[in-house]
Structure formats: structure tokens, C-alpha cells
Amino acid sequence: MGVSALGYVALNVSQPARWVEFATGLFGVEVRRRAKGKALDLRIDERHHRFTLYPAKTDSMAALGWEVATMADLESLAEALRAEGIEVAAGSAALCEERKVRALYSFHEPHIGVSTEIFYGALVSNTPWAPSRGVSGYNTGNGLGLGHIVYWVKDMTATIAFYERVMGFRISDTIAWDDNDAIFMHCNPRHHSLALVAEAPGRPGGRLNHIMLEARTLDDVGYGFDIAKDMKIPMIFEMGKHTNDHMHSFYVVTPSGFGMEYGFGGRLISENWEIRHYDQPMLWGHRPPV
Ligand SMILES: [Fe+2]
């Protein structure tokens, strides 16, 4: 029971053209335009898409999609959400077609406050992924999922309890540093698919901190680092390595204002995992640009 991976992200974006430039130029995504409408699907692996961009007046999360391994798990997770008093709506045939999945339920997640979907049966395309720049691809196979997502949250205790007890996550570790307090959670061997950071002045609960994509090679990230500088994409943290998941990565600002981490080499959760507690997020690097 519970979710098995981070599946997809649908975004309302106020600057779709800049998003396309950003996502193709830096991450090498394949843009899939639709016969009808202005929404854009972005592809990074064998799946039909992992991101959808909806042109909009303001930037927001349209839907955060968590994958569930079986149809039976999907039904029991929907039931568990209802038992929490959460209103859960079965996805219409049109919405399933939009997301390219066999079945889904949508609900307003009450702790982070994000529009959330749980789904089963993502469509794998019959054509190979065609990256828009020379990258070796993303580490999304073997059940690891899209990557990870990090939110600031208002009530850490209640949010952690919800994701553990209802959504099926387990705690990987925690990091407390300066005025930050973060918890990292896994739902498959990826070190974390979700992380929660306690809100602080100027960083309100419910705000999206960043989404991480994991490259298959360090060179993809290295070229990406140079490209980000050449494209003058605002950088949050330069290259560094994390204490907890051992990810080698850098962080940039997306055209929507939240961050994206471009990583490589994240460690996997082992069978006899021990929860650790750190006082720094980085082993080295991850410094703000000067
Ligand atoms: Fe991250």
C-alpha cells in the first residue's frame, strides 16, 4: 500500500516560452505539442511525459502525481485518504487521457496544500525519447520514479505523520542547519522522493522549494552547469555534494521561481537502513554564486 514513486508534475506557468527555453536548453527535454490547445508535455524518459506546462496568468502547481504500483493499491490508498476525511475524486476518462494513465484519483492534500493525484498505469511511448541536447538521460527506471520534490511546510509533525501513515513513506534521515529543519522520506530505493522543510520567515509553508532530476552521468550535470552559466539561468547553489543522499548537484531557479536541482549519483536506500541526523546539507560545495 501507499505510493511507489514520484510520477509526474503538471504546472501552471506564466512564461511558457521561457520554460521551453529553460527545459530544452538545460535539461534536454523533448517537447510534445498537442494537436489541440496550448498545453505542452515534456518528456525525459520512456514515458509519454513527466511534466505538463499549462500557460496561465500565475505560476502554481496544477497537479503533483504520485504513482501507485497496482490497481488494488490505488483503490486502497483512495480508501485510506477518505478515511482521513479527505474528499477524493475519481479521475474522469478525459483527465486520465490528459495524464496518460489508466486510472487516477485527485484530492487537495491538506497539509502542504498541494493539488495531488495518485495514479496507476502510466503510458510508455512507442517512440524513443529524443532529447533536445546531448544528454545520456535520467535515472527514472527500476522503480525510482521522476526524482524528488521538496516543500516548505507549516506543521511538520502533522505532515510527516500523514505521509508516513497514509501515503506510505518512510523516514530516510533529517538535517537541521542554521534556521532550517528538514526531513527526507522515501517510498522506493531512491533516498528520498519527498522532503519537507519547516517554514521560516520569508519561506511560508506550502511553497515549493525544488524538484530534482537525476542524470545518468556526472558529465550531463557538468555540461549542464556550464550551459546554465552560459544561458545566464539564475543559480541558487553551485556544484556540491549532499551529506545525506550523496547527490552531486547544482541548483537553478526555474521561470516559475521555484528551484530545480540537477543531480547525479544519489545513494539508494538499503535493506538495513539506519535513520541518521545531520547538521549540514552539504559535504562540500553547494555555495551560493558569488
Ligand atoms: Fe534535492
Image (tube, rainbow, N blue to C red):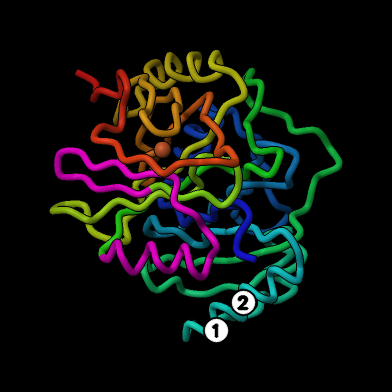
Alpha carbons under labels 2 and 1: distance apart? 6 Å
Whether 272 is drawn above or below 286: the answer is below
Residue that lies at the very extreme toward the front in this rendered image? 272
Which image quarter: residue 215? top right
What residue is shown with label 1?
82
Amino acid type indicated by mark 1: Arg
Whether 161 is drawn above or below 242: the answer is below
What are the residue bounds of the magenta stretch? 155-183
Amino acid type indicated by mark 2: Ala
Which image quarter: residue 94? bottom right
Q: Give the percent coordinates (x, y) of residue 189.
A: 60, 42
Answer left or right for 99 relative to 62.
right
Q: Quadrant of ligand 1?
A: top left
Q: Is mark 2 within 8 Å of ligand 1?
A: no
CB atoms at circles 2 and 1 under 8 Å apart? yes
Q: Residue drawn at (70%, 68%), measured in percent from left and top?
A: 73
For the residue carrying disc 2, how many other residues have a C-alpha within 10 Å: few (<14), some (14-19), or many (20+)? many
What residue is shown with label 2?
78
Q: Give the percent coordinates (x, y) of residue 221.
A: 50, 20
Q: Nearer the viewer, residue 165 or 12?
A: 165
Report if residue 221 lies within the magenta region: no
Q: Residue drawn at (63%, 48%), measured in percent from left and top?
A: 41
Answer left or right for 46 relative to 223.
right
